[in-house]
Image (spheres, grey):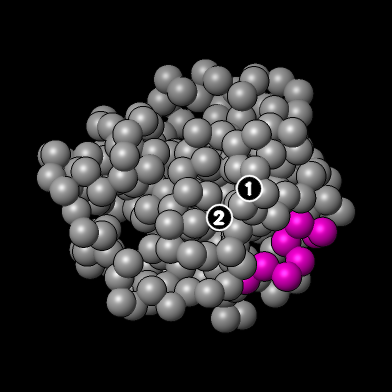
Amino acid sequence: MPENTVYKGKVLVAGATGRTGQWVVKRLQHYGIPVRVFSREREKALRLFGESVEIFTGKIQSSVDIAHAVKGCEAVISALGSSSVTGESSPGDVDRDGVIRLADEAARVGVKKFGLVSSMAVTRWYHPLNLFAGVLLKKWEAEEHVRKVFSTGGRSYTIVRPGGLQDGEPLHHKLHVDVGDRLWSGWINRSDVAELLVEALWLEKAKNKTFEVINESEELQASLEHCYDTIS
């Protein structure tokens, strides 16, 4: 564990039962950071995490549910992701409105840090993924709202735009970081996306950063702190 790990606040993880969200929980626990999970499926959360985390059951479509979940937390990490074209699991309901609602309620109760898993290519309206109910455009709108809400009042954000997500252990790759949505392809382990957002909790240089990231080469890493050195 890095010596400068001083973050002790409780973190709410939204989208925790998804594959990236599970890694966020694991990496928070690795550093001994208290975790609260916000999930609409309590039994699934219990199967995945047991009694090792607090579990708040609710829906991302409900401001009341979110308000209960974020109360008493110092930070929020959102790994929310849509799973259907229409309905409550659509990009509009989850990737945009869900994240916006989460950011608003978090700010309202005094949460100071907001981490968001977004996506590479969110600024490209012509990208094929937008055929899935405009998912990238919805993520972009959510990003813009998070930047607006969490860049003032002593609050801060970190937005990670990963390439294609794959499974694997963290800290096994040297990563390539860029800004301005200029990367066109590439893959990254979900575990490294989680690691970047968890380390951002205590890194001053991670405040108010939005960046893209993909694997560069296989190479063991002691931490991913250095990835923030090149982000302007």
Depth order, front residue of 156/56: 56
Depicted 36 relative to depicted 206: above or below: above
Identify the residue shown where x is 67% and y is 27%: 90
Cβ atoms under marks 1 and 2 closer than 8 Å: yes
Instruction: Check disc 2 and report its element: helix, strand or loop.
Output: strand
Residue found farthest to the bottom: 154
Q: Is residue 33 left or right of residue 87?
A: left
Q: CA distance from mark 1 to mark 2?
A: 6 Å
Task: Indicate the position of residue 22 as horizontal and vertical percent values.
Answer: 52, 41
Q: Is residue 18 left or right of residue 104?
A: left
Depicted 198 relative to depicted 172: above or below: below
Q: Amino acid at mark 1?
A: Ala
Instruction: Check disc 1 and report its element: helix, strand or loop.
Output: strand
> What residue is pinned by disc 2?
77
Task: Write down the quadrant of residue 17 in the picture.
Answer: top right
Task: Indicate the position of residue 26 as horizontal and vertical percent values.
Answer: 47, 49
Task: Write down the quadrant of residue 70 in the picture.
Answer: bottom right
Depth order, front residue of 232/2: 2
Asked whether residue 221 is in view, the answer is yes
Q: Amino acid at mark 2?
A: Ile
Task: Indicate the position of residue 186 as horizontal and vertical percent values.
Answer: 25, 32
> What residue is pinned by disc 1?
14
Task: Indicate the position of residue 232 as horizontal and vertical percent values.
Answer: 28, 67
Depicted 50 relative to depicted 33: above or below: above
Q: Is residue 199 magenta?
A: no
Q: Earlier in the sequence, mark 1 or mark 2?
A: 1
Badge 1 density bin: few <14, some 14–19, many ≥20, Cα 10 Å: many
Identify the residue shown where x is 61% and y is 43%: 49
Q: Which residues are magenta?
A: 67-74
Asked whether residue 92 is in view, the answer is no
Identify the residue shown where x is 50% and y is 33%: 19
Q: Is residue 52 left or right of residue 62?
A: left
